[in-house]
Amino acid sequence: MLDTNIISNPPVRTRIAPSPTGDPHVGTAYIALFNRCFAHQHGGQFILRIEDTDKKRSTERSEKDILDSLRWLGLQWDEGPGCEGEFGPYRQSERSHIYKSHINQLLAKDCAFPCFCTAGRLNSLRKEQMEQKQQTGYDGKCLSFTKEEAESKISAGESYVIRIKIPAEGECEFEDKLRGPVNISWSQVDMQVLVKSDGLPTYHFANVVDDHLMKISHVIRGEEWINSTPKHLLLYSYFDWEVPEFYHMPLLRNPDKSKLSKRKNPTSIGYYQAMGYLPQALVNYLGMMGWSMPSGEEKFSQQEMIENFNIARVSLGGPIFDIEKLDWLNGKYIREDLDDDAFRKLFSEWAFNDEKVRQIVPLIKQRVERFSDVAKIGSFFVSGELDLNVVDFANKNLDTDAELKILQYSLWELEALKQWDREAIESCLLKLCALMELKIRDFLVPLFVSISGNVVSTSVIESIFILKLDITRARIRKGIEVLGGISKKRAKLMEKEYRAFS
Ligand code: GLU
C-alpha cells in the first residue's frame, strides 16, 4: 500500500549551521544531536552548513575541529563539507554569488535599502539612545534617499551596507513548535544589516537564503535565536518562500543555572575527548538535556534515541550540564559496555597513541635513567586534573598576584592563537614575559607547576603544545584556583591592564 504520508509531506531536512570561530562547543553537539535524531526518525536528512561569513573571526582550524568533533561523537551529517549533496557548496564563503543575486532581488522589490551612515554616526546614535533610555537600533535615516540619490552615492564610491526594511507598525506572530505562539512587536526589531560594506552577507541573510535553497523543512536551534526569528520570517515573506517550522531548544546551563560558559565549565568537545570520556556516553548525556526516554531509562544509544524520539517531549526548563552526572554515566558505560579487551584497546589508543608517544619520547628520554623513572615525570601527559600544592608555586621573586597574572594572561594569549604550533606558543609566551618585564625563569614557574603538577618536569612550552589548549586551559584554571582564584572584579581590572599592553 502506498504511504500517503510520505507522498503528501515534503522530506524532512534539518541542519546545524555552526560558525567556525572557536572551539567546537558541546552546545553545537547538543543541537546537532536533536536535529539528527529528528531527521533520521522521519527518514530525512541532516545537513551540516559552515557559516563562515565573518571573515575576521572564522578560521580553518576551528572548522576542522568542529568537523572532527562531530565525527568523533558519531554525529555524522548526510550532506555537508566532505559529503557533498545536490544543494552544495555547504560553506557560506563559497556561496557569495548566491547572496549577491538574492540581495539584488530584495533591492528591486524595495524590501531593502542601502545605508551610508558611518560607524561614528551609528555610535553616537546608540549612545544617545542609551542615555535617553530608548531602545537602541538604526533610526532609518537613509530611508529618505530616493533611488537616484542612493545610486549616485554608490557610483561616487561611498561605502554602504544594505539593510532590511521593517514594517512601521504591528507585530510579528509566529508559532514556535515547542513554545506555542510568539508575538514580537515590529518596533522591537532592528533594520538589520543584510549585506556588510565588504559585500559579504550577515548571518541573518545568508542563513535564511541557505535554509530555503537547501530545502530545510525544520529549523531546530538554540533559544538565543528566538528574537531574530521575526527578521527571518520577514525575509521569507519578501521572497515569497515557504516558511520552515521553528523549534527553539532550551540552552544548556551551568549547575548555577547561568548559561553554560567556558568560565564555569569546560565547553569544548575536545576537552571531553582529551579527558578520556567515551563519545557514546557524552552523546547519551547530551540526549538527556531536556529530553528523556519514554521508559525513563537513562542509558541509551543514539539509535535508541532516534527510535524513541519525540520532539514534543523536549522540556523547556534549562537543562543543567552537570559534569558529575556525566562522570557517573561515563563510568557506567566503561563498566557495562567495555570488556577488558575493548578497554585495553581504547585506553591504549587514548593514552599511548603514536602521535602522542612520538612527541613525548624525546622530552622524557633526556631526563630518565631507567624506564621506571618515566611515570614520575611523564604521568601528567596521561592525566586529567592534577593535584596541585600551593607550596610548589612558591617563588621568592614573585608574589601570588604576579603569579595569578602570569597564569591568566598566558591563558588569554594561548586562547587567542590562530595556529596551535610550538613556535606560536613560544613566541606568544616570550612576548608576554617581556611585556611583563619578568625573567623567563620566574615567568615559567607558575605555568610549569600548573601544567605538570611538579617542580621538575619536561619543557613547559613543549608540554603545552602536546597537551593542547583544552587540557592546558583546565590546568591553568586549576592553578589559578589553588592560588586563591581571581574575583570577578579583579578579573575585569586584569583584563583592562592586559588589553593595555598586549
Ligand atoms: N551560525 C549560527 C550559529 O553559529 C546558526 C544559528 C542557526 O541555527 O540559525 O549558531
Image (cartoon, rainbow, N blue to C red):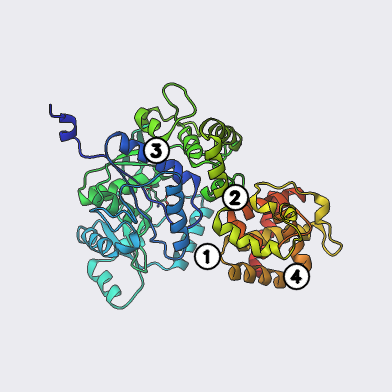
Instruction: Determine the residue positioned at 45% across, 41% down.
Output: 30
Label 2: how many residues lie within 10 Å, few (<14), some (14-19) or many (20+)? some
Q: Tell me, yes or no, if residue 282 can be seen here.
A: yes
Q: Earlier in the sequence, mark 4 or mark 3?
A: 3
Residue designated by label 1:
418
Q: Residue 34 carries which label?
A: 3
Query: Looking at numbered disc 3 in the image, what kind of residue is underneath it?
Result: Phe
Q: Mark 2 points at which residue?
A: 351
Question: Which residue ends up furthest to the top in the rendered image?
Answer: 295
x and y percent of residue 313 in the render?
39, 27
Residue type (three-letter) at the residue carrying disc 4: Ile
Disc nearest the viewer among 3 and 2: 2
Q: How crowded is mark 1: few (under 14 residues within 10 Å), some or many (20 or more)?
A: some
Q: How far apart, in angstroms, are the residues tagged by discs 1 and 4?
A: 24 Å
Tag 2: amino acid: Ala
Q: Which mark is residue 440?
A: 4
Q: Is residue 395 left or right of residue 493?
A: right
Q: Earlier in the sequence, mark 2 or mark 1?
A: 2
